Image: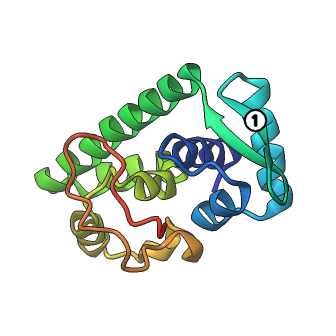
């Protein structure tokens, strides 16, 4: 998964209420060192604010998304929805070559589309069947859905997956 894809996945998780480092890490499946780097970048770009709160057992750190961060996630999800719609249209028209070319061009976005529930997973798997290729050529094993997602048949570009909290 490309670096920028991970940034938007982390930002999306925060947008949807995951504000503690360990929960962000568990949800995004990004190792702690890399997650720290991503969070620093997001903070430097003004997409998140890190707040330290005093608690009974010491200080707690919470991560909150800014208005700028909300807009960034919404724009990116909209872009992914447009890319998915393009792939779905090519699948429906049966144009294997153009579909493969479009999927190749958007390979780096596929795990992010899966994370945000932008794609219809049933149609996505049928695309591979139509082209006669394996999904593993496009989706790393760690990004494959594990049954926690719905069928992904969304039309609103929303965030619809089971994040386990």
Q: Position of residue 26 (x, y in %)?
A: 63, 67
Identify the image's colour scheme: rainbow, by chain, secondary structure or one colour. Answer: rainbow
* Position in image of residue 83 (x %, y %): 35, 40
Q: Residue at x 59, y 25 (%)?
A: 66
For disc 1, the neighbor class at 10 Å (few under 14, some 14 to 19, many from 20) is some
* Residue at image point 21% right, 51% down: 154
Closer to us: 147 or 128: 147
Q: Nearer the viewer, residue 88 or 148?
A: 148
Position of residue 48 measured from the top left corner of the image (x, y, whole percent):
67, 31
Residue 86, located in which quarter of the rendered image?
A: top left
Q: Quadrant of residue 153?
A: bottom left
Taking 89 as reference, is 54 left or right?
right
Where is mark 1, residue-wise? 50
Q: Is residue 151 above or below residue 34?
A: below
The answer to whether residue 135 is above or below residue 47 is below
Q: Nearer the viewer, residue 120 or 52?
A: 52
Q: Quadrant of residue 33?
A: bottom right
38 to the left or right of 18: right
At horizontal 56% and vertical 77% (from top left) the residue drawn is 141
Q: Position of residue 165 (x, y in %)?
A: 49, 66
Q: Residue furthest left?
A: 93
Horizontal placement of 100 versus 104: left or right?
left
Camera-side residue: 2 or 56? 56
């Amino acid at each position: 998964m490309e670096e920028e894809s991970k940034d938007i996945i982390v930002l999306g998780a925060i947008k949807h209420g995951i504000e503690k480092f360990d929960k962000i890490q568990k949800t995004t499946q990004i190792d702690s060192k890399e997650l720290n780097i991503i969070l620093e970048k997001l903070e430097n770009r003004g997409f998140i604010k890190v707040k330290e709160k005093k608690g009974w057992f010491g200080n707690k750190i919470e991560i909150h998304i800014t208005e700028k961060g909300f807009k960034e996630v919404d724009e990116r999800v909209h872009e992914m929805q447009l890319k998915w719609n393009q792939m779905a249209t090519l699948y429906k028209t049966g144009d294997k070559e153009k579909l493969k070319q479009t999927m190749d061009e958007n390979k780096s976005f596929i795990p992010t589309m899966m994370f945000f529930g932008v794609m219809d997973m049933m149609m996505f798997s049928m695309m591979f069947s139509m082209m006669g290729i394996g999904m593993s050529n496009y989706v790393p094993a760690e990004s494959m859905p594990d049954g926690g997602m719905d069928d992904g048949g969304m039309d609103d570009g929303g965030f619809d997956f089971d994040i386990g909290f």
